[in-house]
Amino acid sequence: MLEFLEGDDLKECFTFSVPPESEELQFPQRVTETKTFGGSVFDDYGNDSYRITLSGTTVNEEKKLIYRGLKKVPLYLTGTKEIFELQKIIKNWSDGKVSTGFFRKTKSDVGSNRKVYLYDLSKMSVLQLATGVASRNYWRVFIKDLKIKRDKSKPKTYNYTLEMIGVEDDEKKAAGLFGDVSNAINAVQDVMDGISTVMSITEAATAAAAEVADYCARVKLAAEMVSNRDISGSLVALNVGSGLDLVSRIMGGDSNSFYNTTKNFLHACTTFGGLAKDGSDSGQKGKIQTSNTYTVSFVSNGGSEVATQKVEYSKTVTEPEDPTREDYTFDCWCSDSALTTEYDFTQEVTSNLVLYAKWNLATATITFNSRNGSRVTPKKVAVGTVATPPTPPTRSGYAFDKWYTDHACTHEYDWTSTVNSNFTLYAGWTKTCNIVFNSNGGSVVDTQTVTTGGLAVYPKTPTKENYTFAYWCTDSELQNVYDFSTPVTNDITLYACWVQISNTVTFNSQGGSAVESQRVVIGGYATKPATDPTKEGYDFVYWATDAEGTNEFRFNTTAINANITLYAKWTETICDVTFDSDGGSAVETQNVGYGNKAIFPEIPVKEGYSFEMWRTRKEVEVPTGETDENDEPIMTTEYQYEEFDFSTPITEDITLYALWFGGE
């Protein structure tokens, strides 16, 4: 543990929660020049100085309680944060935030008013405290350097080394934390009182508080036993010489029992996260505070957040603006969580305080539990008014009954009663049966739902082409006619029974133009469609009873006794390409399938002429240049010729005309 003092006034205190892994004490030595945090130089002390080196690691990241003296609340830190907290304390001290020029040690500084003491708590048993000479447990030190380096093998771990120069004071150190036995006991008791106060502020968990109380009782018992014993120096020396530890046997432990018991007590306190706040004793009523101000917190109990206030001792809290909360109106602030005592804002504040918001319900919410039915949106109702029923939910196999105040649905809700609180209503249901109508190819008939024991309603008569409806049956074989006066006790399906009255003749043109179907009475004859279907590239032949067109249907001799489909028979269209040689030798006509190309024929001959090309011809009307009595141009018909391209697909009959060159 390190103490930073100005005179007898303790300014800072730091305790290693986990003892260093390595302690090195070198004596004697002569100091010449040493670099410090402040850049100071140590003069030569001769042979009365120690070189003290403490080394350790932050590998243990479990949070521990860091004791900081009687007037400051312990810190709750991991190993890493603990060592950097020590670095901050040393830096602040050396920067002059506590006392400037501290680390410059000269001859006169040995008796300076600014001091740092290092305690070895492992040597501070009751026996050693009583004698004061059992073993060395403290030094006045001058901090040389604190080195913190990241461990290369463990990136999240730091290794630290604290180097110090230690000297022995001329007189025994007794003013700091520990002095004689009674002072030590009182000091420990003060620590326990301070921590107990912090515990009450943080409202620690019951189990952890019981553990702390247990260790606290053990420390008090040990302290009482020690204080009631007459431990004289001669008795101590006698027992030390005989190898016996009187005090340890009195307390029931080894020579470190008192220290270990206290250490266990402090360790139990590590469960209290709230102890990690900095503070000091304000002097008012034994409360642990950083100053004479107190914290007043406001718990809005579901309302809008209200800022915490800092109030000086014996002053009053400023009443904040009323918080807001949906569906509630603010009533008052209470000093207890049970909301039984309204807080008086004229009352002086002498401790930390928590105030709790009390609310009055303004808008009640009615929640609807549909009990496996469809969801019903909650309804908000102004307190003191009457609610209206929501749209009833639905549920497969059930009919909605009414809303009840209990889940068992034994107490019907009265919709004329006023609403004064939030509550839940439960849907009541009656088991139902479904009557499904299978129309066997006819028009759709809606399913009916009736309560168990009710009667089905005779539905609207369905329709079906070529049939007339007869009745509903209970079986798909249509053997049992259903009696609609029979009570329905289970889900049932009814089947439509039909009587055929006509048949349908359907015409499948197989890619040709559509032909309308015909309805023909049973035993009657179909009528041949007045217009044959058309299909590009094909010629219609007849209607057949098969898709291949092998069996021609005879309209006048074949009776229709069932539904029938007739298929169009087609043949490919053949186009004639005729050649007009205009007096030349004859050229044979070509028969070309629809969409195919004509073949350039053998060139004709004509005496005195040379064949030039085959042409197409079309008639066009052109003006003659004259007008009639109405002054309209007189037209005449002429032929226009154009060379024929034999790569053109043939889609109709065509005549080609020869063009000749020459002649007389």
Image: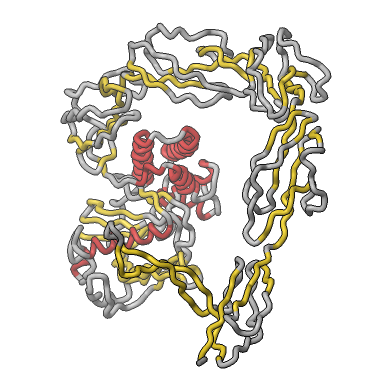
Question: What residue sits 76% from the left and 36% below the top?
Answer: 563
Residue 625 placement (x, y as % from top left) = 31, 70
In the depicted structure, whether residue 436 falls above or below residue 76: above
Q: Quadrant of residue 216?
A: top left
The mark total stands at 0
Q: Residue at x 74, y 32 (%)?
A: 503
- Quadrant for the N terminus, please: bottom left
- Residue placed most toward the observer, 285 or 339: 339
Q: Quadrant of residue 453?
A: top right
Residue 196 position within the rendered picture, expressed as x and y whole percent measured from the top left: 37, 36
x, y percent for residue 413: 48, 9
Q: Is residue 482 left or right of residue 276?
A: right
Residue 229 shows up from this direction = no
Q: Nearer the viewer, residue 417 or 512?
A: 512
Residue 28 x %, y %: 37, 75
Rendered view: 213 above or below 261: above
Instruction: Name the colouring of the figure.
Output: secondary structure
Q: Residue at x 81, y 38 (%)?
A: 558
Front-lying residue, 379 or 186: 379
- On the picture, is 330 further left or further right than 571? left
The answer to whether residue 615 of the structure is visible from this angle is: yes
Q: Considering depth in this image, is 45 or 513 the residue closer to the camera? A: 513
Q: Please determine whether, in this image, residue 458 is positioned above or below residue 205.
A: above
Residue 183 is left or right of residue 134, and the answer is left
- Name which quarter of the figure residue 527 lies in: top right
